[in-house]
Image: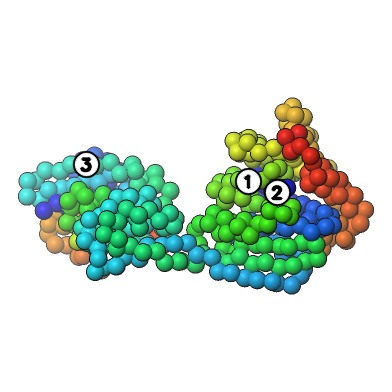
Amino acid sequence: MKVAFTVSGGDLAAPLDSRFGRAPKFLVYDLDRETFEVVDNRQSLDAAQGAGIQSAETVARLGAKALVTGHCGPKAFRVLRAAGIRIHYAGEGTVAEALARYRAGELPEAQTADVEGHWT
Amino acid sequence: MILAIASGKGGTGKTTVSVNLARAFDSEIQLLDCDVEEPNDHLFLKGEPTGREIIGIPVPEVDEALCDGCGECGRFCEYHAIVSFGTTPLVFPEMCHGCGGCTMVCPVKAIRETARPIGAVETRRARNVTLVQGRLDIGAAMAPPLIHAVKARLRKDLPAILDAPPGTSCPVIATLRGADLVLLVTEPTPFGLHDLTLAVEMVRELGIPFGVVVNRVGIGDDRVHRYCGQRHIPILLEIPDDRRIAEACSRGSLIVEALPEYRGLFRSLVEKTMFRTNPKEA
């Protein structure tokens, strides 16, 4: 199973980026193979509108079944849910730390969006 | 003759010029308030409302029984207003620009369009002026479809003045397209000049003849005049910085009625713009 993390850096030591729709990159970690890939989210970052929807489509296309991020707006939340992706909110820290907490079951699944649209 | 009143900067006097020009025209004329986010020509032209029509844009509605989840609609939509993951698509009406593309690409014809209201077109009659104004709903994101609905009321057999929104983006372009002549209203300040240069680039891009109105002459500096002189841009009207004008405007009065000595000034602008035989000479 794959888990997507929002990041601005390019490895597990990079801090988790709190934004979802306008996250600079996604780090997609494969729990079965213990490997990861980093995918640029420039297209959504530069989008005039609909960044959250577009980012959710990207994460779905990457095959992730869970997302760990700081915050998620209402439209992105709807799309992620429709794509069958579980959303987990994590505070500050590196991707490695967030991954460890995810594995330990310390990041409960979010039931609602936690910010308004156009949140920065 | 369609004359559009625009400006880069807000607050330079587009509405003031529009309403006074319309009244000074004397005979039958149409005034279209295309500043649909904040229409205020009606504050100066008192008259009887004659109509109101709700305007909507077409947004998709998916028939779940017909949809096979192929995802063509979502791949087509540039604005992510419709999203599909092999299931019935999600629709975000507030993102939709109403282009109708998803309806056209759907292979099983599962999408039909319903109207989503974005505002209203209101008309009123104020002596020689037929005022048509758009009023965008609060929170509605797209002004151009409503501006097009306002302009659809334009009668070809009568002259018209279009009061544009400020700036140089889509709502302004939607207003100016099809105009015979554009007046760019500015003020003689560094801010006025900066935004005037943007507006000049815009009308040059659109290829519409244009001239400048300098409002509140006496404040600021002479850079707007120098700029227009160097580029051979005609200054068609100069309105002096007169406290009585500001007072009349603050009461919702027309300058040409409250201060009759200025009537000639606006009448001269009517002659220079509305009765020109060759618009290319601007």
Mark 3 lies on residue = A38
Residue at image point 21% right, 45% down: A27
Give me the C-alpha separation between circle 1 and circle 3.
49 Å
Query: What label sits on residue B119 in the rendered view?
Result: none
Subunit under mark 2: B
Helix, strand or loop at label 3? It is strand
Residue B77 is left or right of residue B247, and the answer is: left
Drawn side of residue B133 relative to residue A48, left or right: right
Q: Residue furthest right?
A: B261
- The subunit carrying tag 1 is B
At x 82%, y 42%, the residue is B272
Which residue type carries mark 2?
Ile
The alpha-carbon separation of the residues under discs 3 and 2 comes to 55 Å
How busy is the neighbourhood of tag 1: few (under 14 within 10 Å), some, or many (20 plus)?
A: some
Q: Could you say whether the residue bearing mark 1 is in a helix, strand or loop?
A: loop
Q: Which mark is residue B2?
A: 2
Q: Please name the residue that numbered disc 1 is placed on.
A: B178
Q: Is residue B252 above or below residue B202?
A: below
Chain letter for the residue marked with disc 3 in the picture: A
Q: Nearer the viewer, mark 1 or mark 3?
A: 1
Tag 3: amino acid: Val
Front-most of residues A20 and B172: B172
Label 1 amino acid?
Gly
